[in-house]
Image: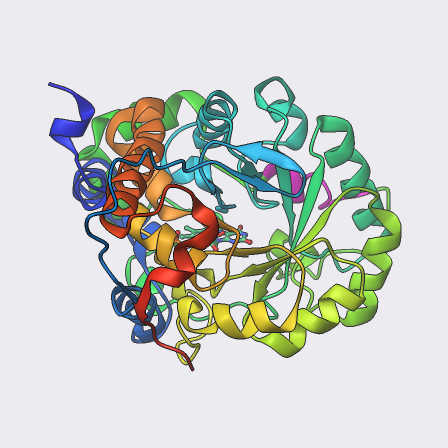
Amino acid sequence: MTLDSKAPAISDLRDRARRRIPHFVWEYLDSGTGNENTLRRNRNKLDEVLFRPSILHGEIEPDTSTTFLGADFPVPVGVAPVGMSGLIWPDAERSLADMARKSGVPYCMSSVATRLPEEMSPHLGPHAWFQLYPPRDKGIRLDMLKRVRDAGFGTLVLTVDVPAPSRRERQTRGGLTQPPKLSPRLMAQVAQCPAWALGTAKLGMPRMRFVESYAETKVSNMSLPSNAHVGYLLRTSPSWEYLDALRQEWDGPIIVKGVQNGQDATRIQKAGADAIWISNHAGRQFDAAPATVEVVADVRAATSLPIIADSGVESGLDVLRMLALGANFVMLGRAFHYGLASFGGDGAAHVIDIIKNDMVSCMHQMGQSNLSEISQQIFRSPVV
Ligand SMILES: Cc1cc2nc3c(=O)[nH]c(=O)nc-3n(C[C@H](O)[C@H](O)[C@H](O)COP(=O)(O)O)c2cc1C
């Protein structure tokens, strides 16, 4: 039985993943914030983008390849940064980086991953991106940038949509703490997931090791308040001046992630960033945010920079929807983790196959042989 017959859609991977990871981990991966309106809106608004089917266009061979920031990609899709990825599935960071390298797509590592940037070096391909939650302290920031660069990451992604932690009530109900503490209730959940439990036991309890390496740091004068979690070191609310400073300090491409309107995009372009990443963090931050697909056209009109979009993408059709409205590239977060938790590295690679095959199938229906003119096929789309 092929993976495609076992799991033809990302929803199949999601169902299987849910059975294979402990409930508290599932709640971490799958939840939004508040009543999860933004989480649902991302999905519902994507479904509202309709295309005109095309008929009698003769034989075509749809080409899903694209160029982004000067590099060629077989599909306009990559792996979005997911914090504590290694909690979701043991050694997720290295498995996903391996998969991305082999598939020729970007892998973006989170600054709150469970692996250190240095441990990732042998696994990185030419499209290794590093996502930065802005450190409060300049000394820490400069040291992080140097380590990340030396480890082989060429593109920096600054996440700006986490000015403060969000409440994520479902995670709290699920018993998730930071760092995770295994209460008897959570232990009972772990016992039901032997593959996860064995893998995690081998590697040790997942922790935010990159940030932790600065907890008693020599590179700054900053000390951690006695009751603060180590994540405090990173959780600043960056300003435009912060972005200017980062632009001076990082000589490769900078992408700003978490953009949700055109005005900000214009200003980010002026600040010298290389790409805009439209995201609402998969509905995990603000329950009154618009769906990302609703703001793509506004951002497209406001900037000539390349645009990435994410949040709620579950198929090749969704990728085409984002591209048709003006995005140039699409990243997925949860889907790759569903794949990994279902079938390991092959499952993550299968996500790329699902996306690609679905894109090809839909492009046939739309009579489009490449990605450059799909916007002409829009029948209806939601715009704010
Ligand atoms: C469990 C989880 C952890 C995440 N951690 C981070 C993170 O550390 N840094 C970041 O910039 N975005 C983070 N994100 C947001 C993703 O990068 C991405 O924007 C989002 O997952 C895309 O939506 P999708 O999961 O529907 O594809 C996280 C998302 C999830 C689901």
For image coordinates 42% across by 64% down, the residue present is 284
The colour scheme of the drawn protein is rainbow
Horizontal relation, residue 142 to residue 297: left or right: right
For image coordinates 54% across by 72% down, the residue present is 260
For image coordinates 57% across by 21% down, the residue present is 123
Q: Which residues are magenta?
A: 209-217
Horizontal relation, residue 199 to residue 137: left or right: left
Q: Answer above or below: position of 119 versus 274.
A: above
Q: Nearer the viewer, residue 151 or 326?
A: 326
- Quarter assignment of residue 60: top left
Q: Position of residue 202 (x, y in %)?
A: 40, 20
Q: Nearer the viewer, residue 173 or 330?
A: 330
Residue 359 falls inside the magenta stretch: no
- Quarter assignment of residue 44: bottom left
Q: Nearer the viewer, residue 289 or 233?
A: 289
* Residue 177 seen: no
* Residue 375 seen: yes
Quadrant the N terminus occupies: top left
- Quarter assignment of residue 9: top left
For image coordinates 87% across by 49% down, the residue present is 249
Q: Answer above or below: position of 295 versus 197.
A: below
Q: Answer above or below: position of 332 versus 229.
A: above
Q: Position of residue 40 (x, y in %)?
A: 28, 68
Quadrant the C terminus occupies: bottom left
Q: Position of residue 138 (x, y in %)?
A: 85, 55
Q: Position of residue 371 (x, y in %)?
A: 44, 47
Q: Answer above or below: position of 82 versus 282.
A: above
Count of all numbered marks drawn on residues in the image = 0
Horizontal relation, residue 359 to residue 301: left or right: left
Q: Nearer the viewer, residue 283 or 128?
A: 128
